[in-house]
Image: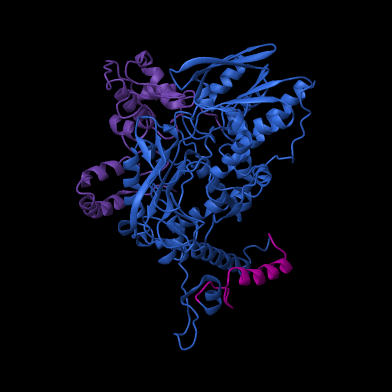
Chain colours: A purple, B blue
Amino acid sequence: MLTRPLLAVVALLLLTTGSQAQQDGGSSGVTDIDRLLDRFSEDSEKFTQTEGGALYRTTCQACHMADGQGDAGAGAHPPLADNPKMNSKHFIAGVILTGYHGMPGFSDMLSDEQVAAVTNYVRTHFGNSYPDPITPEQVEALRPPKDAN
Amino acid sequence: MAKTPFTPSRRQLLAMIGQVAGAGAMYQAMTSLGFAAESGYRGEIDLQGPRQQRRVLILGAGVAGMLAAYELRRAGYTVKILEYQDRIGGRCLTLRGGDRYTEMGGHEIACDFEGDGYFNPGPWRLPIHHRAVFDYCQKLGVPMQPFINKNNKAYLHSTNAFGGQPQRIGHVEKDMRGHVSELLAKSLNQGGLDEAVSIEDREKLLEGLKEWGVLDSDYGYRVSNDLGEVRGWDIRPGGGLMAEKKPSHPIDLSPLLHSGLWEQLFNFHGYRFEPPMFEPVGGMDRISDAFAREVADVIQLNARVTTIAQSDDGVTVTYEDGGRGGTIRQESADWCICTIPLSVLAQLDVDCSDAMRKAIAAVPYASAFKVALEFRRRFWEQDDWIMGGISYTDLPLVQIAYPNYGFLSEGPAVLQAAYDTATAGRNFTYSWSTMTPQERIDAALVLGRHIHPQYDAEFMSGTSWVWHRVDWSLGCYGEWTDDLRDVHYETLCEIDNRLVLAGEHCSHIPAWLEGSLLSALDAIRRLDARENA
């Protein structure tokens, strides 16, 4: 259906970004724009990144920011650093699956492996160093039961 | 290895229903999914008014809050609005050259448009059946202009189809109609539908299909001058001794089916997107400005609500004057109408029933983003003959919307160069939301030049909006599901002692202005009835 490999596009973009970089005075090189476009998944309905950091940069970073500090104004996106809730890998994986307050859940767009990867990433970065990674099997057990029909 | 069970997105589900059971069934399913709900507007509201002096405190100066203030004051209530921002209008806003906004994360969004083009980060088009919006626009003097949602000259584009060349919407639509008509005629002629249609009906149908699908005498969908009159020409009929006209050639069925462009046509099918749609002349904030003209004198800006406390006969709202960390002050009133988005409200100290607190915390807020780019000239009009409308693509920018004003004018003009919401079921909006303002512009340029190669030569500046980086909404709109509604919706909308919530999140039309207006009208109607019970 919507599975449209972006590889061809990316290849074309690579051919053209060089000239743009020159126009920009070289401020944004080929690798920068390539890395940026890598944030878009090849499948619009499932995230296709597998590594925890890549998944963080294409989803969580929108609210929790590149440095994991979140931000606050009228409302807040909570920091992932110095946050006691990070203590529980089950809680974090559960929030990623089902959402929390205004945060949307990602259970339909991330596999158990991806949820485990990003959970383990946020619990070992931004000053966190929790020693107990979660496994995909443990993530699967956290998924809410689906209706039989 | 763990496997995720297949749960189709609403989009997948609709496409499946459409393919298997036809457009009628798909529309029916869309209605069930809440995509095509009617507006419940019942005309001008008639409030009784209070029997004694009554004060209503309204939280939020978006259109829901301002409408509530406007109508309640007309009915004799004393009203006051507390607003967190230093501006009014909430999510109904417009950016123009010179505007600046600092989003969460600390990046500044600059809008440096040099021409008179503008950018509506939130609502941007109005379906004609959204009667409350149109009624208030008429009442408050907001002029309207047509919004071209579907322009047959605009493009459908698929990266892997037709060598990446965009196709005209009208061509895709007419070719699908022609091919389907041909197949249907073939099946009728071979007796394949004898059980479904009588002989008389079969003759009527064949006769109609010939016209409708522009089929030739053998019921074939082929190039002809008749088709030229419907689909257009390779050489258009000219004047004098200009070259002889030549009809255009249809795209073959199989590549069309595999291109995904047929599916992109469904973007125009919804009842909400039926032509004609409308927009306020000059930008969407003309609507919020019109409400502000009526109620600006009761709005206090820069007030960040922290606590909503209730007793049996009133409410006390604590707020920080000047924003987070500001001077703490209080306001008391007989009633409180709270239009603060649930995403933010869930983080505040709200004195209400456990059930309502659960409802407030239950609704996720949808991801949505837009990028707008200003160009030196209207190349889409001058080179591509696209006057307004929207092109769709399978690239992550999803759609390019052309301005529906200033046609053929010289000088700079603004495109809405990328836009998507989580409702569509695609993940692109999350990824755009992770980008800095400059990165969004870079990505929109690099992707958009596949549809309009003129981007490179004509680009001037860009701006953008990411709703999850807006601290007063933490997302774009309440992302309800049927399951969530079953459990929480009624509780959320009920009057809880002296408090009632309003806004698009308290409606069956989330994200639309009509939803916020209907919600506010219903809330004040019930409040007024309670006051007079």
What is the x, y in percent for residue B440?
A: 35, 43
The answer to which quarter of the image holds residue B362 is top right
Q: Residue furthest front?
A: B297
Residue B204 highlighted magenta (yes or no): yes
Against B530, is B201 above or below? below
Task: Specify whether A91 is left or right of B512.
Answer: left
Q: Residue at x 58, y 22 (%)?
A: B359
Q: Residue at x 44, y 42 (%)?
A: B426
What is the x, y in percent for residue B271?
A: 62, 50
Against B27, is B319 above or below? above
Identify which residue, B133 or A84, lies in the foreground. Answer: B133
Residue A115 highlighted magenta (yes or no): no
Q: Which quarter of the image is occupied by the C terminus of chain B?
A: top right
Q: Which quarter of the image is occupied by the N terminus of chain B?
A: top left
What is the x, y in percent for residue B382?
A: 42, 66
What is the x, y in percent for residue B273?
A: 58, 51
Against B272, is B384 above or below? below
Say whether residue B401 is visible: yes
Q: Which residues are magenta?
A: B196-223
Identify which residue, B324 or A45, lies in the foreground. Answer: B324
